[in-house]
Image (cartoon, rainbow, N blue to C red):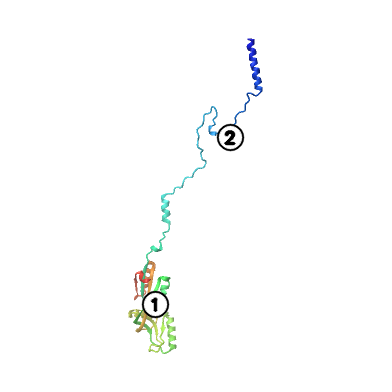
Amino acid sequence: MKIFFWLVLLVNLILVALWGAGAFNSAPVVLPQSELNAASIRLAGIAAEPTVAPVSTVHEVPEKIVPVSAVVSAVSAAPTVVAEANVPQVCMEWGEFSGAELARANKLLAGMSLGNKLSQRQTEQTNGYWVYIPPLKDKIAVTQKLAQLKARGVEDYFVVQDDTPLNNAISLGVFKTEDAAKKFLVELQGKGVRTALVGEKSGKLKSVAFIFNSIDHTSANRLGAMQKEFGDSLLKNVPCALTR
């Protein structure tokens, strides 16, 4: 029994000696940070939690839904633009005019501002009719008669000055037909011109026809209304190729 006690005591002394010498103090192995795998680290006794995808804190704003009725209303409210090329165009001819009627027609057409859409075609004929005041005795009488005409609103006239029996006559208008001349004479009489006459006029009589190239229907309707003021004139549609 004593022998066993001393053996145990000897073993303990040996162990104490070895412990003091550092035989049991080996340094732990430390891995570099790059070799550590965080996914493989598990705490002892704690079950691994399932991986949950992070929840975004940004909330998407749903797209604004526009009612179909609002879209239809917006389309209906939009102005309709018609391309100029799709607007129907017409070409017309209006004539023929001379003398006072030509001057009056020119004045009316100037108010339409047609620009290069308006042109003229001139024709000549050997005989026609004119409204005139017979020859006066001298220039003083001519001057007095012109003053009377202006006072009555007549400003379109021409004084004949040549070595013929018609010298010092006053031409008030030249016309293609006798009916047109007589109609104009009635208008002058309504203004108080009593001495004017209608007569045949020999020689070249120039007349003018107006050509309207590619005008819109609004302008065409205005021309139709104007033509009624010139009963002997003719307003007609013509192929646009003939107006170019």
Residue that carries the numbered disc 2 in the rendered image:
33
Identify the residue at image location x=41%, y=83%.
Answer: 158
Kind of element beneath mark 1: helix
Name the residue at 66% across, 20% down: 17
Q: Amino acid at mark 1?
A: Leu
Amino acid type shown at disc 2 = Gln
Upstream in the sequence, badge 1 or badge 2? 2
User: Mark 2 falls on what kind of element?
Assistant: helix
Residue 50 located left or right of residue 241 = right
Quadrant of image for the N terminus: top right
Instruction: Tally the marks.
Output: 2
Residue 25 placement, left or right of 153: right
**Where residue 148 sits: x, y (%)?**
43, 83
Residue 80: percent from left, percent from top: 41, 59
**Mark 2 crowd level (few <14, some 14–19, many ≥20, 10 Å Cα):** few
Tell me where residue 165 appears, x and y as whole percent.
38, 89
Q: Would residue 90 be seen by someone viewing this image from the given angle?
A: yes
Q: Quadrant of residue 44?
A: top right
**Residue at 65% over, 22% down:** 19
Would residue 195 be seen by someone viewing this image from the given angle? no
Q: Which mark is residue 102?
A: 1
**The C terminus is located in which quarter?**
bottom left
How crowded pointer 1 is (Cα within 10 Å; few <14, some 14-19, many 20+) is rated as some
Q: CA distance from mark 1 to mark 2?
A: 109 Å
Q: Is residue 169 above or below residue 224?
A: below
With respect to residue 223, does 17 lie above or below?
above
For discs 1 and 2, the disc positioned in front in the rendered view? 2
Q: Report the residue at 55% width, 34% height from top.
A: 38
Seen from the viewer's position, the closer of residues 134 and 56 is: 56
Q: Position of residue 65 (x, y in %)?
A: 44, 47
Is 41 on the left-hand or right-hand side of 177?
right
User: In this view, which residue lies farthest toward the top?
Assistant: 1
